[in-house]
Amino acid sequence: MRGQMGTLNHVAVVPRLPSLQLGCVRFVPLRVEVRVKLQMRGIGVVCAGKRGRVEVGKGGEEVEGDGVKVQEDPKLRLELKVKVAALECNARKAKGGEGVGRLRGHTIGVDLGDVRTGLSVSLGGFAPRPLTVVRQRGDKLLETILQVALQEKADEFVVGLPKSWDGKDSEQANKCRSFAGRLSNLAARRGWRVYLHDEYGTSQDALDYMIDIGSNRRSRKEQLDAYAAKALLCNYFESGGSRAQIVVPKPLDLQQLLCQGPSMPPLSSLEDDDGFGDFDDE
């Protein structure tokens, strides 16, 4: 063991597999735990000291969350890495690859902005359409996006990644990556996938399209972000998802849920209109 040994009185012994952890936690004195840890390779250790400080022994990857660090099973992480790599995005299924013949899910496009965030949707890979513009940030924005996904029966998100003309990340790219990571942690609980996709040129494409269909200036100002999200999904499906990068949550229990696939519990309240209307092409 390493760290502040003098502050540790007891340790919690938990199985490494998340599916076995519920109801299987036990606390033992530190000296006993040292011997147990040397003898049992299938056990992960969480050590709680004074002031909530936590230390773990070496021998596996450590993941921090809610103020604790958990030693995880490298074999499980490797198995999940293979399963995640085998996940198919809806664009690939729509393109007619290995996923042909299987049900294609719905996809939510997200054009993230500092003030306004545009959302779009594609039903089974067909005809992406602008959905709404959300004027929220942080947790409220994440909440709204998940609510929209439930309404639209979506199983994946495509978040636009700002890049420059030469393919390099722009100044806003880090913010989008961080947002996609937070969204991934929440979406994985329902088995939903989150992807990052280059959004270069989508705003201009959206503006050109809105001018072509005769949208007035006010409409273009208010709805541009949603149409940019639509353009993002168009690029995503046209490429067959070949340029999309899946965002994987770090906790292994969330990766397991992600690999299990979408879970859609009945939510009768979502059948009612919540004010999110589609934009009609003018």
Image: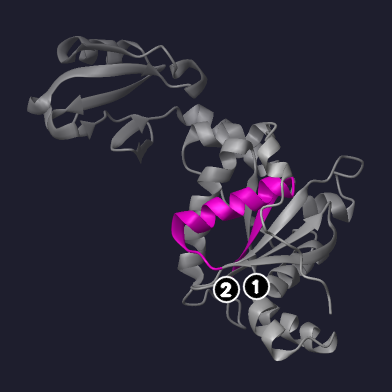
Q: Does 141 lie within the magenta span?
A: yes
Is 241 placed left or right of 282 in the picture?
left
Q: Secondary structure at mark 1?
A: loop
Question: Tags 2 and 1 in contact by the CB under 8 Å rule?
Answer: yes
On residue 162, the disc is 2
Q: Which residues are magenta?
A: 135-162
Q: Which mark is residue 199?
A: 1
- Is residue 278 visible to the viewer in this orientation of the structure? yes
Residue type for callout 2: Pro
* Amino acid, disc 1: Glu
Q: Residue furthest left?
A: 6
**What residue is rendered at 57% in x and 54% in y?**
144
Q: Nearer the viewer, residue 187 or 272?
A: 272
Q: Quadrant of residue 230?
A: bottom right
Quadrant of residue 14 within the rendered picture: top left
Residue at x-position 70% and y-position 32%: 266
Q: Is residue 153 left or right of residue 138?
A: right
> Element type at marker 2?
loop
**Residue at the (21%, 15%) spot, across then down:** 34
Mark 2 and mark 1 lie on one chain; the one further toward the N terminus is 2
**Horizontal and vertical percent for residue 248?**
55, 46
Give how far across and how far down residue 104 sits, in percent: 83, 46
Residue 192 to residue 18: above or below: below
User: Residue 17: percent from the left, percent from the top?
Assistant: 48, 21
